[in-house]
Amino acid sequence: MDIITPLVSFLAPFLPTLLGVGKKALDKGAEKLGEKGAEEIFKKLSPHLEAKPSAKEAVVYVAENPDDADGLGQLWLQLKKILEAPENAVLKAEIAKILEGEEATAKGKFKVNAQGANIVVIGDRAKVEIVK
């Protein structure tokens, strides 16, 4: 299972906050939901990032330049090297489990009733039914 691509997509927006670079505020609800997972993943990855100067450099660069495609590609490559090393199989499994939990939280089922407006919204696909 490829976890590198979703890991980079998930972690990159949190790097400025995790590293204290630019003190980027996390004000969107979805980002707040994922902040705990990002912190947990970053805590697990930190020793490996610190031990590998090229990986640390990629993390800092993406934190400072979160929209730079080349930087994201370099981060992807460094995370791939770390997570695909045989000695890091447990780390990879732990991170995959965290990512799965974050995805489930972000896409969780919910039901909202807006009785006064005669509108019922059900699920995470925003299906709207007019109730008369």
Image (tube, helix red, strand yellow):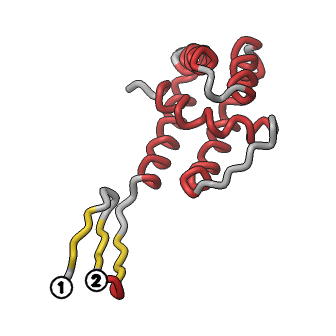
Q: Is residue 119 left or right of residue 17?
A: left
Work out whether residue 95 or residue 76 is closer to the camera in this orientation and state it.
Answer: 76
Work out whether residue 29 or residue 99 is closer to the camera in this orientation and state it.
Answer: 29
Residue 48 visible at all: no
Mark 1 nearby-residue class (10 Å; few <14, some 14–19, many ≥20) = few
Q: Residue at x 22, y 71 (%)?
A: 129
> Residue 28: x and y, percent?
60, 54
> Residue 78: x and y, percent?
61, 15
Report the residue that reaches farthest toward the left.
132
Q: What's under tag 2, amino acid-wise?
A: Asn
The residue identified by callout 1 is 132
Q: Quadrant of the C terminus?
A: bottom left
Q: Is residue 121 left or right of residue 89?
A: left
Q: Name the disc covering residue 118, or none.
A: 2
Work out whether residue 86 or residue 9 is closer to the camera in this orientation and state it.
Answer: 9
Mark 1: secondary structure:
loop
